Amino acid sequence: MSGREVADSKVGSGFGKLALALMCGTVLGGIPAAAYAQDVGAQDGPLIPADQSTPTQSITEINVVGAERLEPNTILSYIRLRVGQPYSAAAADQALKDLAATELFSDYSIQNNNGIVTIKVTENPVINRIILEGNKRIKNDKILPEIKLAPRQIFTRSKVRADVARIIELYKRQGRFAASVEPKMVQLSQNRVDVVFEINEGPKSKVRQINIIGNEAFSDGELRSEMLTKQTRFTRFFSSKTSYDPDRLAFDQQKLRQFYLTEGYADFRVVSAVAELTPDKKDFIITYVVEEGKRYKFGDVKVESQLRDFDSETMTKRLPMHTGDWYNAKQVEDTVDQFSELAGTFGYAFAQIDPEFRRNKDDLTMDVTYVIKEAPRVYVERVDVNGNTLTQDKVVRREFRVAEGDAFNSLQVKRSAARIKSLGYFQENFEIDQKQGSAPDKILLEANIEEQPTGQLQLSAGFSSIESFILAASIQQRNFRGRGQTVGAGVNWSRYSRSVNLSFTEPYVFDRNISTGINIYRKDYNSFNYLSSNRNTTFKQATTGASLRVGVPLTEYMSLVGSYTFNYDDVSLDENRFFTDRQNPPAFECDPLLAGRYLCEALGTRTSSIVGLTLGYNNLDNGYRPTRGTSVSLTGEYAGVGGSVHYARVSGKAARYWPLGSGFIFSLSAEGGAIKGLNGDEVNLTDRFFLGEPQMRGFDIRGIGPRVLRQPIISDGNGGTTVVTDRDKVSDDALGGNAYYIGRAELEIPLGSGMKEMGLRPSIFMDIGALWSVRTPALQSCAYPDGCSFPVRDSEGNQLYLQTITNADGTKTTTSVTSPTAPDGSPNTAQMTSPISPFREVFLGNSSSPRISIGIGVNWNSPFGPLRIDLAKVLRKVDGDDTKTFSFNVGTQF
């Protein structure tokens, strides 16, 4: 082989060594082209011999040198050189190109020695691991699945370049156009390498300015307000809409077009939309060039119906637009939707409504003809339920308002979807799909459901000036065994109250549209007062009971529920502390001076046998997170079918929800009630209404309504007295009320898509309410400075006396005894008494005057579970009310 041919055949070797040198450096990507040209010179590939007339030589032997992982025969299969074939520089050059195309080698060369061809290769290293450094905004588990390189794969430069581009693209999707990636390679033993991607995430690229050129009818500010993308401003520090997003840019062009079409500019178009990245790659400047065109009015508008059930003239008269009105494309679209829904109610599921437009440029009018084409009346061929793994088919099917074989009715299908969503078992955006059946007049209805967790573990915590730290826990499964049954248990605990309850509800008894449920519960409540700054338990209330309910539907939206409740109540006091025998004749009874007369009157055991009836109306689109609809209920209860308690109680609730568009949801709700004692009985303390958190945000638990405050009287230091009114040092006993009302207004505010995905749903609210209508209790007091006193008893309730004994040495010893006489038969010195510090009781809060609070709250589906936070400000209260600014509760779902 000539020297010229040898030189030609070694071109591949030089190229391979250069590649190896580059990969063994720190930088794998971005090698300047000038440096490459300097090493390789002007050669663009293997040199072709100038002397093409040189005699060729046959290949007698082919050897492969340097292979480690690959078999020599495998390497030979990549090239076209074969034993017996003539050897030439062109054939060697093609073999080098074939080896390069495999991307398996970092160096390769071909030598010919009198027909013995030697192929020398250096294999590309094997990747040991992929290391990402500097990535904080995008975690490893988001990047690694997107790149091609992986451990145990062959390292190639092309894959590195592709992965660098892919990582940068991921950051661009997050609006970080200044992100850069520097790949590095760490050489290891056994021809292995670690590939390191050093990532500089850079700042998030914001939209610095939005320029609009060509607009005359509307200002830049008006048009920017229609766009989803917003300019970066200090007031939008937390907004995600100021980041640049190419998809959002395209969406904003559609928003501009929709806006102009609703204002009558039928010829409007966006000529161009350009986003320019500033030199520092930190911000974008977006420029829109628009052509507004002329503004049109509606010309001749009419309906041409080919359906026998629709009269063209009648429908034309009911069109919302009229000749001379400004043209509004959105109004046209809404009218088409209304016609489609109307046709569906008549059974024409596939009715086609085509609006035909005729633009009159001379008088700038737009004629619109709604053509309702002939279509067959459709019947439901089949109802399919798909996607349910836990929920039984019958749980879904029994909510359908149409059955197989029925005439199609779009309103009934929409109602079926609303009822299924109200179950709360499936995705929020559930819809019933409609598909063509086996014939033109048949339709398939498909409920493609995605089951969601229906179990809920709720944990809540709070701090109350009345009950100190409060904990509550409940567990509930709303789709028990996939049958639609609800089972639950709950526990509440605080320093002064405890309760436990068990519940079960069957919505369809024996697969009939009759619901039944049972609750079993135990509630213990310990009230307290203050002596100085120490809290002391006063009365204890224990309620044990059960309730049974049965409900039947009256109409599609109205139902009637009957209930029976039996309660056993026991209200008691610590006799050693609050009972005395100061009465004449002596009687060991509750002392109003110690406990308060209203508490003494509440003592004892009683049984309540209560029957109730509730009439309800509900057409909410979702029972758990409604966005539209109305809910109303009216309940009457009578206690006196047996038992020792007699009263009549009535209460009602109502709520209405409106979707305002763009994700805003406004709601109004109200409730109220009254209770009246029968047979001359007063309503017991335990049967009255109580109001506060959580019914009224901004107020503490039982923080609204009638109460008795026992206020200490102390010296003012100047010979006079002062009354302590600090609520932390005053005994505060809520008495409840016989009548109450509550009103609420709330606006749920939508956030960006990112916040929505996190489950954040903030709202602003206003609450108004009151609790009143109890008789003024007999109040107690102890005058200053002497105060009052009461007899002292031992732990067993025995009266204590002071006994003085003279010792042998003449000294005297005084002790407390339970006997009124000394051992010698003489009476003891005195009855032991304990002083009561001066105080006065005041009765406050018995007013129907409205209490008002406003605030902000947020629901968050946090990683810990559903979280509700409220921050409230009380605008109006009544003397005695107990306010509270902040509250929260948190839970989890399973």
Image (cartoon, rainbow, N blue to C red):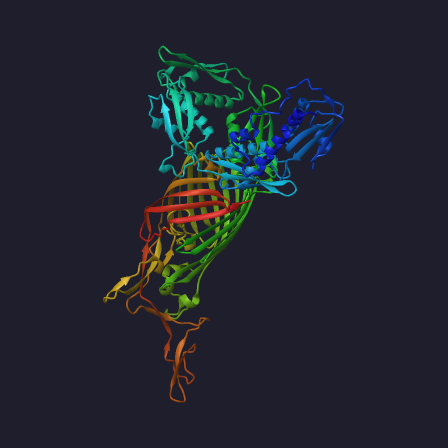
Q: Residue at x 60, y 22 (%)?
A: 437
Measured along the vertical axis of the image, is residue 580 above or below residue 654? below
Q: Nearer the viewer, residue 13 or 647?
A: 13
- Please state the horizontal and vertical placement of residue 45, each as a whole percent of the image: 60, 25
Quadrant position of residue 158: top right
Quadrant position of residue 513: top right
Pick out the residue farthest to the bottom. 809
- Please state the horizontal and vertical placement of residue 535, each as a whole percent of the image: 40, 62
Q: Residue at x 56, y 34 (%)?
A: 163
| Residue 6 left/right relative to 492 | right
| Residue 173 left/right relative to 67 | left
The number of discs equals 0
- Please state the horizontal and vertical placement of residue 586, each as a whole percent of the image: 39, 71
Does the image show residue 526?
A: yes
Q: Nearer the viewer, residue 338 or 133?
A: 133
Does the image show residue 387?
A: no
Q: Quadrant of the C terminus?
A: top right
Q: Quadrant of the N terminus?
A: top right
Measured along the vertical axis of the image, is residue 430 above or below residue 782? above
- Please state the horizontal and vertical placement of residue 414, each as a whole percent of the image: 51, 29
Pick out the residue farthest to the top. 362
